[in-house]
Amino acid sequence: MQPNFSLVFFTTLAGMSQGLLFYIAIFKSQFNLLSNSFLTNLALPVSFGLLIASLLASFFHLGHPERAWRAAHMWRTSWLSREVIVLPLFITTVILAWYFSAQDKSFPIIWLAIVILAFLLWICTAQIYQCIKFIQEWAHPLTFINFLVLGLTSGWLLFGSLIWFWSDAIENAYVKLIPAIGVALLFIALTIKLTIWKRNRGLKPKSNLNSAIGIPNTRIRQISMGLMGGSFNTREFFHNQTNLVLDNLRKIILFGAYLFPILILVYALQSSTFSAVFIALIVHLIGLMCERWMFFAEANHPQKFSGVHQQELWHHRQAAQLCVPRRFWLHRAGDL
């Protein structure tokens, strides 16, 4: 698939905010360890800002953003519609928690609602992709588990960074647990990601050119995209990157999202340099953006052209566009 950067930012920022709010709700409602000043002046504003930023990012992949509200009409059957409903409810609940924290009031029902809505949003977001049965890379429970664990991991690193920044947010005895729990979460996330990569390598396409056109000849080979330019399929179902680029990106994900943050947190744990948690967060966030891009790039749609390397078709299209006058292959309104 062609990764859309608006969705990359949306899933990354929203997942991090969900994780942050999950820990805020647990530590406040169950242990009462967080001060209202920390929540009012730092933690809840940051989480609210991340949710708004992710919401705005999601609009950039829409053809008509002004019609986004209509997506909620199909809530009975569409996970996207359910996400459109749950996200505003989640943001509203965060605003209520922020307001009551500013008033030095605490209602356990609000924190419980935040936890429930955070999990519902993870479920809705993951199911948008997991429910697509013909994309084998997504149609597996590991899709939801990966979204959940990465959200909890990035949220924990952000939570720890905010506690380090707000020195009296929590007792020092609990601060020492932040790097240790972060290392454990990163190891779990890494194990899940390696399992997903191993599974994806073993997947085989269920369709090919022969099954598509009903001709059993094994020598069929597609060498043209058709016409003189691209189409929706060639734009949306190809990322036009070589296997070398993808392999190098996997290495960046492995080290950036997992191994380097683990090493940084181990250093923070041994040296009691808790400012290193913030550095681990930045490194992890860069790797997480790459991981989310790869999540879309690894998805192979059935309409992907079989038997032909993506780059070969790409060069065919580029050559066709160079040889044909511009007015014949531009299709957007106003170009003719």
Image: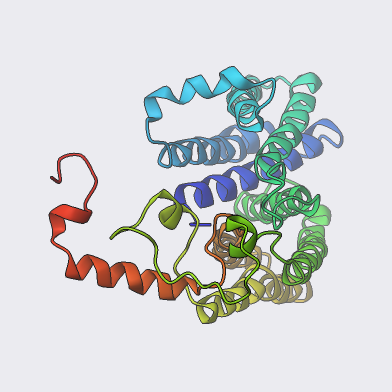
Name the quadrant containing residue 316: bottom left
Q: Residue furthest right?
A: 30
Q: Please report the residue visible at 72 percent of the width from the left and 29 percent of the height from the top.
A: 117
Q: Looking at the image, how many numbered discs can be counted on the residues? A: 0
- The quadrant in which residue 32 appears is top right
Query: Residue 35 at what x, y percent from top left?
Result: 71, 36
Kindly indicate the quadrant of the structure image that contains residue 317: bottom left
Name the residue at 81% across, 49% down. Answer: 141
Judge by depth and name the residue closer to the eye, 270 or 254. Answer: 254
Residue 139: give x, y in percent of width and height: 74, 50
Residue at 55 percent across and 74 percent down: it is: 246
Q: Is residue 167 above or below residue 313?
A: above
Q: Position of residue 191 (x, y in %)?
A: 81, 67
Examine the rendered structure and indicate whether residue 100 appears above or below residue 132. above
Viewer-proximal residue, 28 or 250?
250
Q: Is residue 137 visible?
A: yes
* 222 and 300: which is toward the camera: 222
Quarter occupied by the C terminus: top left
Residue drawn at (80%, 39%) of the image: 27
